[in-house]
Image: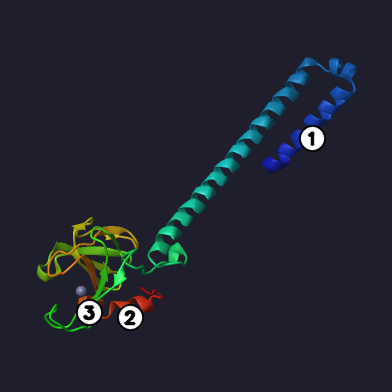
Amino acid sequence: MSVSSLARRALLMTVAVAVAIGLAPAQAQAVPETAVNHEDSSEIALQMRLAQRTQALAGLNRRADERDRAIAGEQAVLARYGYHGDPDAVRVVLPLESYDISAAFGLTGPHWESKHGGQDFSAASGETLVAVSDAVVTEVAEAGPYGLRTILTLGDGTEVWYCHQTTADVTAGETVEAAQRIGTVGSTGNSTGPHLHLEVRPDGGDPVDPMAWFAAADLTP
Ligand SMILES: [Zn+2]
């Protein structure tokens, strides 16, 4: 017999006794003391079980609320970086919340030795940079013209370079999650103003257009 049907039976018995006492006080007085004590203790046990169940349900509801809030919080953070889907299914987010698109991939000109190997996002110095995907940090170092550079290596071997940073918040060997802060925008190295120079290098090879890479993940910077 289940706990709830036992509890229901006990409740029915208690109600029956209470009704009997209420309707026939004279008879109730005639009930032997041991029987009254037995009913009292079963009612106390029932109330304790009910209290425990209520408490357990409240605990479950509280945990469900906490989980809902956590998911809503995660969704809000991911939405800031251009992702609006299920937090558990996130693959790629944008590297910055607030920016202007500047120099495009593939440009040639006096600023670059050959062609421009990344996409520039101009942003305020100190603006937060986040990981574009779950990744391992494979390098954080001063890198000549690239300035302070962080390299993330994604699960598929793609390297994502963040260049000209003011500060880095992660160290090589660390794992990061999509939208996790990794450092700040700056103008270190060969740079004429604060911006993120972002490179995407499949298998660590030649760079591809980051805009096309974002578009392939349904993101539009
Ligand atoms: Zn650039």
Q: Position of residue 167 (x, y in %)?
A: 19, 57
Q: Is residue 155 visible?
A: no
Q: Secondary structure at mark 2?
A: helix
Q: Is residue 66 above or below residue 12?
A: below
Q: Secondary structure at mark 1?
A: helix
Q: Which mark is residue 207?
A: 3
Q: Is residue 1 above or below residue 112?
A: above
Q: Which residue is mark 2?
A: 212
User: Are there few (<14), some (14-19), or many (20+) residues within 10 Å of tag 1?
Assistant: few
Q: Nearer the viewer, residue 129 or 134?
A: 129
In the figure, residue 29 lies in which quadrant?
top right
Q: Is residue 33 visible?
A: yes
In the figure, residue 218 lies in which quadrant?
bottom left
Q: CA distance from mark 3 to mark 2?
A: 11 Å
Mark 2 or mark 1, which has the lower sequence index?
A: 1
Q: Which mark is residue 12?
A: 1
Indicate the quadrant containing the C terminus: top left, top right, bottom left or bottom right: bottom left
Q: Which mark is residue 218?
A: none
Ligand 1 is found in the corner quadrant, namely bottom left
Q: How is the image coloured?
A: rainbow
Q: Secondary structure at mark 3?
A: loop
Mark 3 or mark 2, which has the lower sequence index?
A: 3
Going 37% across and 65% down the picture, which residue do you hit? 81
Mark 1 or mark 3, which has the lower sequence index?
A: 1
Q: CA distance from mark 1 to mark 3?
A: 76 Å
Disc 2 marks which amino acid? Answer: Ala
Disc 1 marks which amino acid? Answer: Leu
